[in-house]
């Protein structure tokens, strides 16, 4: 088991957070604290609040961040920041998706490379797991998540293979699911460079953890959580995540709904955020060579007005 998670676009994110030594910051996706450690090191009199919905991440942080006296840990969802943190902050970082330790621990069920139970919950207190999604969700729901979240063009074939197989016997293991997926795919798809189960696993994982819902709820409250000039730095790995961030930032920057023909605004909606990155920041060549996980990373930054 690898404990380490290689943090994506670390120097770019730290720079774009514009850290003030006496400021208050939130890392909403602590993981193994690669980004958090660099934030904490830059604080003098300030504070870092680390949040993760996975208790093992929080335990890791409490054990491994003892040299810092300005770091707090909260187990929770970043969409609940307004309830979890009572003060406004100078910056928030989100590095979305799963961490390497979550993927590497077979029993967590995230990996299509090792045998484990169909779980995929980031928060192991959550009721819904991949087991229910795979064994209980309708064909249409399965097809939709595999197609939309997994971007699997053979989603119908995979979903119907899952339904046929579970009609005979429940599906309980990750490698069992991998075999069902492989048998459903045409030869050309099996010969692609990507693992044939990658897209289906991604679709199921996003559904189990309601990853897009979490981002939407977070973005809705973001302007209320930041102090004036406070920044949000968000790393996404999926086009649907990036679209949500881009859209929410754009609406917060230009919320006016008045027809362009009106000489002055009458809707009364005032901008709350200023977009700092008109185009997403992408990883450089060095990072792409060193860190394969960075391949689909995009960073967007906005600042509270
Ligand atoms: C990609 S990892 C973060 C890695 C971290 N930046 C590092 O350098 O170690 C994502 C982490 O965010 C957590 N996470 C994902 N969605 C979350 C949510 N909605 N609320 C809180 N934590 C979440 C996951 O449990 C995982 O530990």
Image: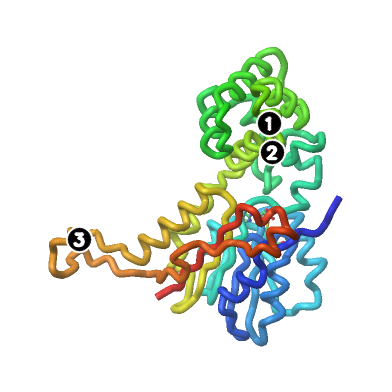
Look at mark 1 in the image and give the residue it sits on.
131
- Side (left or right) of 98 relative to 16: right
Q: Position of residue 159 (x, y in %)?
A: 59, 24
- What's the mark number on residue 194? 2
Q: What secondary structure is found at the residue carrying circle 1? A: helix
Cα separation, mark 1 vs mark 2, equals 24 Å
Residue drawn at the location 66% of the way across and 82% of the way down: 43
- The crowding category of the residue bearing disc 1, from other C-alpha atoms within 10 Å (few below 14, some 14 to 19, many at least 20), is many
Q: Position of residue 147 (x, y in %)?
A: 54, 33
Look at mark 3 in the image and give the residue it sits on.
258
Cα separation, mark 2 vs mark 3, equals 47 Å
Q: Is residue 190 or residue 221 the one in the foreground?
A: 190
Can residue 213 be seen here? The reply is no
Q: What secondary structure is found at the residue carrying circle 3? A: loop
Of labels 3 and 1, earlier in sequence is: 1
Q: Nearer the viewer, mark 2 or mark 3?
A: 2
Residue drawn at the location 17% of the way across and 66% of the way down: 266
Q: Is residue 273 or residue 288 the one in the foreground?
A: 288
């Amino acid at each position: 088991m690898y404990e380490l998670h290689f943090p994506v676009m670390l120097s770019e994110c730290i720079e774009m957070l514009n850290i003030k030594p006496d400021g208050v910051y939130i890392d909403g996706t602590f993981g193994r604290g690669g980004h958090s450690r660099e934030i904490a090191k830059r604080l003098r009199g300030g504070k870092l609040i680390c949040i993760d919905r996975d208790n093992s991440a929080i335990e890791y942080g409490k054990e491994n961040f003892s040299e810092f006296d300005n770091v707090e840990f909260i187990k929770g969802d970043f969409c609940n920041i307004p309830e979890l943190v009572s003060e406004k902050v100078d910056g928030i970082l989100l590095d979305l998706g799963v961490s390497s330790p979550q993927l590497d621990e077979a029993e967590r069920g995230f990996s299509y490379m090792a045998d484990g139970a169909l779980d995929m919950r980031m928060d192991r207190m959550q009721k819904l797991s991949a087991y229910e999604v795979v064994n209980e969700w309708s064909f249409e729901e399965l097809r939709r998540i595999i197609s939309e979240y997994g971007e699997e063009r053979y989603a119908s074939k995979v979903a119907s293979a899952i339904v046929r197989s579970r009609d005979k016997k429940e599906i309980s293991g990750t490698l069992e699911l991998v075999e069902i997926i492989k048998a459903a795919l045409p030869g050309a798809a099996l010969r692609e460079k990507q693992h044939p189960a990658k897209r289906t696993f991604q679709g199921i994982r996003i559904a189990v953890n309601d990853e897009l819902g979490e981002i939407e709820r977070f973005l809705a409250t973001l302007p209320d959580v930041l102090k004036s000039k406070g920044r949000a730095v968000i790393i996404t790995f999926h086009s649907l995540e990036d679209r949500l961030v881009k859209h929410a930032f754009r609406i917060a920057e230009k919320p006016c709904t008045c027809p362009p023909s009106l000489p002055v605004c009458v809707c009364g909606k005032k901008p709350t955020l200023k977009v700092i990155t008109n185009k997403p920041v992408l990883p450089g060549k060095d990072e792409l060579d060193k860190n394969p996980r960075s391949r689909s990373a995009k960073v967007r930054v906005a600042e509270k007005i």
